[in-house]
Amino acid sequence: MTNPEVGLERRDIFSDDHHAFRATVRRFFRREVEPHVQEWEQVGSFPAELFRKAGAAGLLQAGIPSEYGGGGGDFLHHVILHEEMGYSLAGASMGGGFGIDGSSYLIYAGGTEAQKHAWLPRYASGETIAEACFTEPQSGSDVAGFRTTARRDGASYLINGNKTWITNGNLCTMVPVVCKTDSESGKGGMSILLVDVDTPGVARSKPIETLHRGCANEAEFYFDNARVDAERLLGGQEGGGFKQVMGVLNDMRVAEGARYLAAAELAFALTLDFVRNRKAFGQRILDFQNTQFRLAEMKTELTVGRAFIDQALGKIKHGRLTAVDASMAKMWLSELEFRVADTCLQLHGGMGYAHASPISSIWTHARVHRILLGTSEIHRVLIGKSLG
């Protein structure tokens, strides 16, 4: 199936440089990802070489200053990378494994100068593949409820606990681990340690089998007295972990929302092409009033969603994004994506249910988007609490 050219219209939030970067990302996905993604799905993982190719093409860390090895752009460059995953036919198979790397943003926003210079150039080149270890089996969206601990022992820390849903889990070479350095201080007792995966006491599971078969390579990590030098403490001081995590999560939630909307727009474009060409009872499916009404509803919601996400991106650009803004963007856009994908699959009929169908892939992955980075229910609670 031909990948429709979706998402190329001019948007005021983006500059000419951003549009040029989008064209570079789209060419990369068409050339380096889409022809191979079915092969990678069979093994459930990207090859590590893909990250090095992306680094050489300037895709990774494009929004990080050049002094740290990045492209010298801004956060919108990372958003474009996420949107282009949504606009790609291979996007759903790519999962969350090839977008904004939360671990690099943790280091950029909260690391010491030494940590930034040591790690960020490796991210930008694709030499280091890392994913932040947030979620725990007993605590998903409740960041404050994490149980993994790090106890100071001389010039190092001993980490104990486990983390789950680590994207690219079997490719990672380093993981920032959110842990309790003071179990009595609640949120104020959380810290982040940068842990090499080959550290003694660190183990990881085989990839977790999920409803959606893609290349995200999710795994669980286990820490059993894993000793990590104190210089790997992010920011150099204990107790800053919760603030560091939430600062990154808010921007990531908006960036993911942009991706969800892009995937919904792709689903709509694919469906519009399908109903224009598919016939039933002697006429195009598009000519049925029910089809026209459903398409009209989706087109309107997508147009509203585009204005909504661009407003949120503008708030990030000007430093005005709040946690409630991020929750609204993540919750509403993930729900919108699923509604659109579900309607589009229905309009495809049996053809949409086949595993090889792009609509099937978009629909399946849209389901998990209502869960990751905070479930829709958690975000409703957060939004509701803000109302006083």
Image: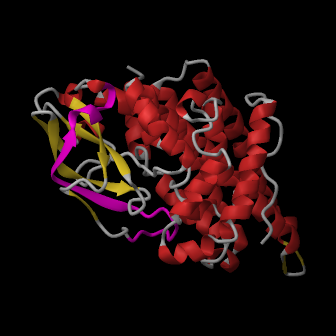
| Most foreground residue, 300 or 223 | 223
Q: How is the image coloured?
A: secondary structure
x and y, in percent, of residue 37 in the image: 62, 70
x and y, in percent, of residue 76 in the image: 64, 33
Q: Residue furthest right?
A: 282
Q: Kindly identify the residue that appears in the image at 16 percent across and 39 percent down.
A: 157
Q: Quadrant of the C terminus?
A: top left
- The stretch in magenta equals 209-235
185 lies above or below 284: above
Q: Is residue 294 visible?
A: no
200 lies above or below 70: below
Quarter holding residue 32: bottom right
| Most foreground residue, 374 or 190 | 190
x and y, in percent, of residue 254 in the image: 55, 36
Q: Is residue 138 visible?
A: yes
Q: Kindly identify the residue that appears in the image at 29 percent across and 41 percent down.
A: 142
| Most foreground residue, 256 or 63 | 63
Residue 229 falls inside the magenta stretch: yes
Q: Kindly identify the residue that appears in the image at 35 percent across and 62 percent down.
A: 219
Q: How many marks?
A: 0
Q: Left of 27 or right of it: where is 223?
A: left
Residue 342 falls inside the magenta stretch: no
Quarter holding residue 270: bottom right
x and y, in percent, of residue 203 in the image: 24, 61
Q: Quadrant of the N terminus?
A: bottom right
Quarter holding residue 268: bottom right
Q: Kindly identify the residue that appears in the image at 80 percent across and 68 percent down.
A: 2
